[in-house]
Amino acid sequence: MTKKFDSFTQFYPFYLAEHANVTCRRLHFVGSSLALMLIAWAIYSGSYSWLLVAIVQGYAWAWVGHFFFEKNKPATFQYPFYSFLGDWVMYKDMATGKIAF
C-alpha cells in the first residue's frame, strides 16, 4: 500500500530514508551535476536534444544507486513530483554539507 503524503515537508524525511546509503546519494549527486552541465550545454550550443540526454543520464545514475546499493525502488515510481523536488533539495543539502556526501 502506498503511503499518502499531504506535503513535501512530510515526504522529505521518507525520501531521505530511501537514500540512507552514501553511495546511492553520491550517484544521485553525480547524475544531477551531469544533468545540470548537459542542460547548460544544450542552452549554450542551441542543440536541445541534449536535454533528453540530461534527463536520461540523470535518472540512470540515481537508479543504479537504488538497484545496486540501496536495494530499493526509486521513490520516483510512486511519487514522481515529490521525488523530483527531493532530488534537488538533497542535492543542495549535500552541496552545503547538511547531508553527508
Image: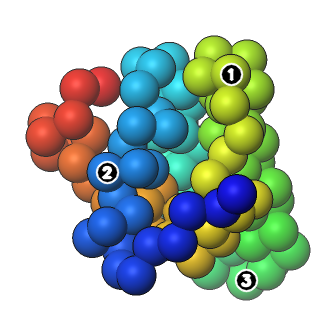
Residue at 67 percent of width and 46 percent of height: 74
As measured in the structure, the alpha-carbon distance from the residue carrying label 1 to the one carrying label 3 is: 38 Å
| Mark 1 residue crowding within 10 angstroms, few (<14) / some (14–19) / many (20+) | some
Which residue is the site of mark 3?
A: 46
Quadrant where the C terminus is found in the figure? top left
Numbered disc 1: secondary structure: loop
Which residue is the site of mark 1?
A: 71
Tag 3 or tag 1, which sits nearer the N-term? Answer: 3
Q: Is residue 82 left or right of residue 9?
A: right
Q: Is residue 96 left or right of residue 81?
A: left
Numbered disc 3: secondary structure: loop
Which residue is the site of mark 2?
A: 13
Tag 2 or tag 1, which sits nearer the N-term? Answer: 2
| Mark 3 residue crowding within 10 angstroms, few (<14) / some (14–19) / many (20+) | few
The vertical placement of 78 against 45, above or below, is: above
Q: Amino acid at mark 2?
A: Pro
Residue at 46 percent of width and 34 percent of height: 19
Identify the disc placed on residue 51.
none
Residue at 35 percent of width and 58 percent of height: 12
Tag 2 or tag 3, which sits nearer the N-term? Answer: 2
Q: Amino acid at mark 3?
A: Gly
Q: Is residue 41 left or right of residue 33?
A: right
Image spot of residue 37 (x, y percent): 55, 56
* Visual colour scheme: rainbow
- Whether pointer 3 and pointer 2 mark residues with C-beta atoms closer than 8 Å, the reply is no
Residue sitting nearer the eye, 44 or 95: 95
Image spot of residue 81 (x, y percent): 58, 76
